[in-house]
Image (cartoon, rainbow, N blue to C red):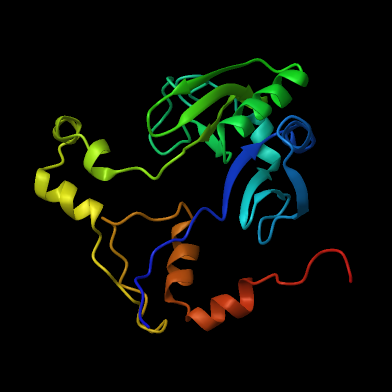
């Protein structure tokens, strides 16, 4: 039976930090996220990588690199600081975790407050109810729950689409992406197109990576063995 190829959820979100221990302590104690991995970041000299388990196959990740401590936090540029603040294009504005009921939302508010952290809400947004608070290093955080799936007919606002330059035809197409079932992994790497998004990797290295066969990338860049022996 064929199926359309699309992401099935968030595997992990990675947040940069200059204080790995402080962030892990906060998310473990205040939010109850369980530390499940911390290891030298694969292929990144001096980098530390940690994973905290949230639910099922959903993880929250932290990355610490040596130069991060030298980068100043600047609200309105590097960080939004709140769910209504601004930050540079492409940066994280806020991070929202989910719970499965209003009771769980209130219990999470209790947990956060019991650790001495200020939090306000819930606020009813219709599609979800949310509480808001801050994490270390000016993270803007939210916990939310929804009692029903979002109904696109009620929540895709034509007036707001117009503000974003999205036509009615485009909105319909965006709400119903073209199905695609994959081609058994046989689609070749497309030619380099500077108009497309690209990772910020030094050009000679990046071009070398793009030209390398997929099996070579697998063989040379994979780090499958856990750091602690069985």
Q: Position of residue 138 (x, y in %)?
A: 60, 23
State which quadrant residue 101 falls in: top right
Above or below, 1 relative to 86: below
Q: Position of residue 104 (x, y in %)?
A: 63, 33
- Quarter that holds the N terminus: bottom left
* Position of residue 59 measured from the top left corner of the image (x, y, whole percent): 63, 51
Q: Is residue 147 shown left or right of residue 56?
A: left
Residue occupying the point 42% across, 20% down:
84
| Residue 103 visible in the current orientation | yes
**Which sits in the foreground, 78 or 29?**
29
Q: From the viewer's perspective, is 157 left or right of 102?
A: left
Query: Image height check: is 184 above or below 72?
Result: below
| Quarter of the image with the C terminus in it | bottom right
How many numbered badges does the structure rendering display? 0
Residue 82 visible in the shown view: no
Is 134 above or below relative to 31? Answer: above
Q: Quadrant of residue 180?
A: bottom left
């Amino acid at each position: 039976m064929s199926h359309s190829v699309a992401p099935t959820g968030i595997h992990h979100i990675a947040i940069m930090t200059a204080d790995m221990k402080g962030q892990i302590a906060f998310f473990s104690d205040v939010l109850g996220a369980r530390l499940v991995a911390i290891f030298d970041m694969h292929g990144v000299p001096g980098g530390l990588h940690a994973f905290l388990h949230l639910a099922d196959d959903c993880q929250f990740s932290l990355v610490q690199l040596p130069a991060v401590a030298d980068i100043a936090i600047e609200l309105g540029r590097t960080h939004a600081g709140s769910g209504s603040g601004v930050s540079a294009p492409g940066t994280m504005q806020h991070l929202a975790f989910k719970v499965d009921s209003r009771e769980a939302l209130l219990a999470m508010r209790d947990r956060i407050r019991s650790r001495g952290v200020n939090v306000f809400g819930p606020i009813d947004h219709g599609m979800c109810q949310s509480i808001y608070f801050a994490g270390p290093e000016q993270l803007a955080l939210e916990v939310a729950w929804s009692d029903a799936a979002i109904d696109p007919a009620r929540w895709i606002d034509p007036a707001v689409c117009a503000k974003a330059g999205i036509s009615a035809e485009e909105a319909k197409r965006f709400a119903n992406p073209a199905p695609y079932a994959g081609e058994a992994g046989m689609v070749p790497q497309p030619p380099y197109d500077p108009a497309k998004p690209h990772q910020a990797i030094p050009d000679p290295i990046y071009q070398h990576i793009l030209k390398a066969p997929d099996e070579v990338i697998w063989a040379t860049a994979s780090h499958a063995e856990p750091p602690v022996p069985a």
